[in-house]
């Protein structure tokens, strides 16, 4: 019942076939330039990652503390207006 129905010829033949006029040699696979990694580069990347992680953690802690302070102040002001 749920079996797919495939067409008889799923891929029609191409309408246009490209024939190059000047057969150029096939380009070889170009390799990427080599990157030399020394200890200073690795240390700089690690220090940068640690610093960015610490900054992100500081922003998260600050946001949480501001949210808690806002809830506390809202609760205090609501109790103050009820009296």
Image (cartoon, rainbow, N blue to C red):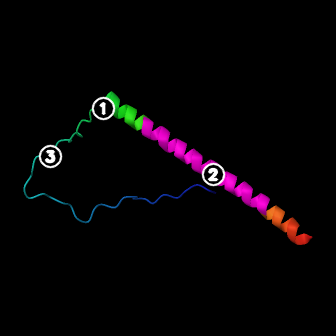
Residue 73: horizontal and vertical position, in percent? 77, 61
Q: Residues within 10 Å of mark 1 (few under 14, many from 20)?
A: few
Q: Which mark is residue 69?
A: none
Q: CA distance from mark 3 to mark 1?
A: 33 Å
Q: Residue at x 14, y 58 (%)?
A: 19
Was residue 69 drawn as part of the magenta stretch in this picture?
Answer: yes
Question: Element at badge 3?
Answer: loop
Residue 23: horizontal and vertical position, in percent? 9, 52
Question: Element at badge 2?
Answer: helix
Q: Residue at x 55, y 56 (%)?
A: 4
Residue 9: horizontal and vertical position, in percent? 39, 59
Q: Residues within 10 Å of mark 2 (few under 14, many from 20)?
A: few
Q: Residues within 10 Å of mark 3 (few under 14, many from 20)?
A: few
> Which of 75 and 40 lies nearest the eye of the viewer?
75
Question: Element at badge 1?
Answer: loop
Q: CA distance from mark 3 to mark 2?
A: 58 Å
Was residue 33 drawn as part of the magenta stretch in this picture?
Answer: no
> Which of 19 and 9 lies nearest the eye of the viewer?
19
Looking at the rendered image, the quarter that the N terminus falls into is: bottom right
Residue 48 falls in image quadrant: top left
Q: Is residue 74 left or right of residue 20?
A: right
Q: Which region of the structure is painted magenta?
A: 47-73
Residue on which disc 3 sits: 26
Q: In this view, which residue lies farthest toward the top?
A: 39
User: Of the residues tagged 3 and 1, which is closer to the observer?
Assistant: 1
Q: Is residue 20 left or right of residue 12?
A: left
Q: Residue at x 33, y 31 (%)?
A: 40
Residue 64: horizontal and vertical position, in percent? 67, 52
> Which of 6 and 46 lies nearest the eye of the viewer?
46
Q: Which mark is residue 62?
A: 2
């Amino acid at each position: 019942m749920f079996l797919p129905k495939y067409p008889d010829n799923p891929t029609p033949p191409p309408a246009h076939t490209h024939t190059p006029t000047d057969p150029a040699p096939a380009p070889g696979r170009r390799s990427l330039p080599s990157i030399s990694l020394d200890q200073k580069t690795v240390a700089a990347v690690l220090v940068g990652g640690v610093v960015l992680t610490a900054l992100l953690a500081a922003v998260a802690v600050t946001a949480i503390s501001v949210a808690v302070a806002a809830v506390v102040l809202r609760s205090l002001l609501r109790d103050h207006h009820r009296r």
